[in-house]
Image (cartoon, grey):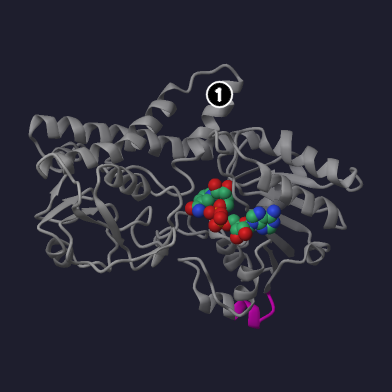
């Protein structure tokens, strides 16, 4: 099959790498720099090796492009563009809208359009299909389906092949063709009765994590007030073989999914007059965690951080990735600076961020560990400052949650 994948970021490039093994893939991205890099065989995404991309480019089963005309003869179009929040924290479908326009104005024959971008239930039926029809003047009768992406960057044991894939088409024919496409590189396909179920399932998976992370973050504050270890208590609770799932405390949630997706669910709940109390509360607790951490550091350091050099260790939103989207480190740094601290950060996986570069891992008055990459030595963290506060539970001997 000839497949176009709109968006060559974390999701789109990962699918391209798998689909390119068995189909002819055109990776369409509006960012010309990414396109040029990919056509040289250089991957910009952890988990997708440059060797794989180079191999696909050489074998001519994959090429990246910024020219929308290149998708004209594709029979399958996968949408994998960002679905962020607007400044007032509402679902922002502007990237989906732009992708719909590109598809409508360039795809020249009836195709199967699959949405992999995360969005609220009803997006495929009530937004994507009408948008494409609006922009194309309904000249072609496309098929539509949804298959929400579940990839977790940096997790190697689960990938596109062995992570079960949910899907549902707007028609039986769309469902069948979607199954045919994904079964060429995915072991387990799970069909659900409507696109809305698939869309809601994806949002609930991430909301489940958001709420449980908030719960354990609150629990860490309770155990600290009781003078007991949150980690020992969680290990003790984890000995129960059923009905318990361990989550660990942190500086907050980050990345493109956990801080964003639940808000999509809350927005649709609001629209339908249903409650989203847990979602809103969990969001609040997770956002407040950075303030709590800084208050603990202030308390341990004589009540003031004025003029003290503070090194934030790890600014990526999670270990072993360079992704800083929605990272909790941003709020931690903001609160430290508002307390008068002179803040720098160390993260060689990220390298450069917000016009600043990674600082050396030594010589600070205080170090606050937000993310611990495997490549960062525990002993070096401990030696980086006379006082080290660890929010990850991975630096033994440091103060922590
Ligand atoms: N990153 C994850 O771990 C993850 C996991 C599951 C689902 N998702 C969802 O997948 C979707 C994509 O996320 P991502 O992490 O891959 O985003 P990303 O920012 O890594 O990549 C998106 C790419 O799309 C390109 N793009 C934007 N608008 C475009 C347009 N109109 N036409 C062509 N290209 C365009 C951008 O240049 C970028 O390269 C989002 O809905 C996200 O919520 C992400």
* 31 relative to 119, above or below: below
Dot 1 corresponds to which residue? 269
Residue sitting at the far front: 307
Question: Which quadrant of the view contains residue 211?
Answer: top left
Question: Going 79% across and 37% down the picture, which residue do you hit?
Answer: 130
Q: Position of residue 194 (x, y in %)?
A: 65, 34
Within 8 Å: ligand 1 and the Cβ of disc 1?
no
Residue most toward the bottom? 58
Counting from the top left corner in percent of width and height, residue 8 is at 61, 62
Q: Residues within 10 Å of mark 1 (few under 14, many from 20)?
A: some
Q: Is residue 120 left or right of residue 251?
A: right
Among the 4 quarters of the image, the one containing residue 344: bottom left
Which is nearer the eye, 168 or 378?
A: 378
> In the orientation shown, which residue stands out farthest toward the top?
273
Point out residue 110 in the picture as x, y percentages from the top left corner: 85, 53
Badge 1 element = helix
* Quadrant location, the C terminus: top left
């Amino acid at each position: 099959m000839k497949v176009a994948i709109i968006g060559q970021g974390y999701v789109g490039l990962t699918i391209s790498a798998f689909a390119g093994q068995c189909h002819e893939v055109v990776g369409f991205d509006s960012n010309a720099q990414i396109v040029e890099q990919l056509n040289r065989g250089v991957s910009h995404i952890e988990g997708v090796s440059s060797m794989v991309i180079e191999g696909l480019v050489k074998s001519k089963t994959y090429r990246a492009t910024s020219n929308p005309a290149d998708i004209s003869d594709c029979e399958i179009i996968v949408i994998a563009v960002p679905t962020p929040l607007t400044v007032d924290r509402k679902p922002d479908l502007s990237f989906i809208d732009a992708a719909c326009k590109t598809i409508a104005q360039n795809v020249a024959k009836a195709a199967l359009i699959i949405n992999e971008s995360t969005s609220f239930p009803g997006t495929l039926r009530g937004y994507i299909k009408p948008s494409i029809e609006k922009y194309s003047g309904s000249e072609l009768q496309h098929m539509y389906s949804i298959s929400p992406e579940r990839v977790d960057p940096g997790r190697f044991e689960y990938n596109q092949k062995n992570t079960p894939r949910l899907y549902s088409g707007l028609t039986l024919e769309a469902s069948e063709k979607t199954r045919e496409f994904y079964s060429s590189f995915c072991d387990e396909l799970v069909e659900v009765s409507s696109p809305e179920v698939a869309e809601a399932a994806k949002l609930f998976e991430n909301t489940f994590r958001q709420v449980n992370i908030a719960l354990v973050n609150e629990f860490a504050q309770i155990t600290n007030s009781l003078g007991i270890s949150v980690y020992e208590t969680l290990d003790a609770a984890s000995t129960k073989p059923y009905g318990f799932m361990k989550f660990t405390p942190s500086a907050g949630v980050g990345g493109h999914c956990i801080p964003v997706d639940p808000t999509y669910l809350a927005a649709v709940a609001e629209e339908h007059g249903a409650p989203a109390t847990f979602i809103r509360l969990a969001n609040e607790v997770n956002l407040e965690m950075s303030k709590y951490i800084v208050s603990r550091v202030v308390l341990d350091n004589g009540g003031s951080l004025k003029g003290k050099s503070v090194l934030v260790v790890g600014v990526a939103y999670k270990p072993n990735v360079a992704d800083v989207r929605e990272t909790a480190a941003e709020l931690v740094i903001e609160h430290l600076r508002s307390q008068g601290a002179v803040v720098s950060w160390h993260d060689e996986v990220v390298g450069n961020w917000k016009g600043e570069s990674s600082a050396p891992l030594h010589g600070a008055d205080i170090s606050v560990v937000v993310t611990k990459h495997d490549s960062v030595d525990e002993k070096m963290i401990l030696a980086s400052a006379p006082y080290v506060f660890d929010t990850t539970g991975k630096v033994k001997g440091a103060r922590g949650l």
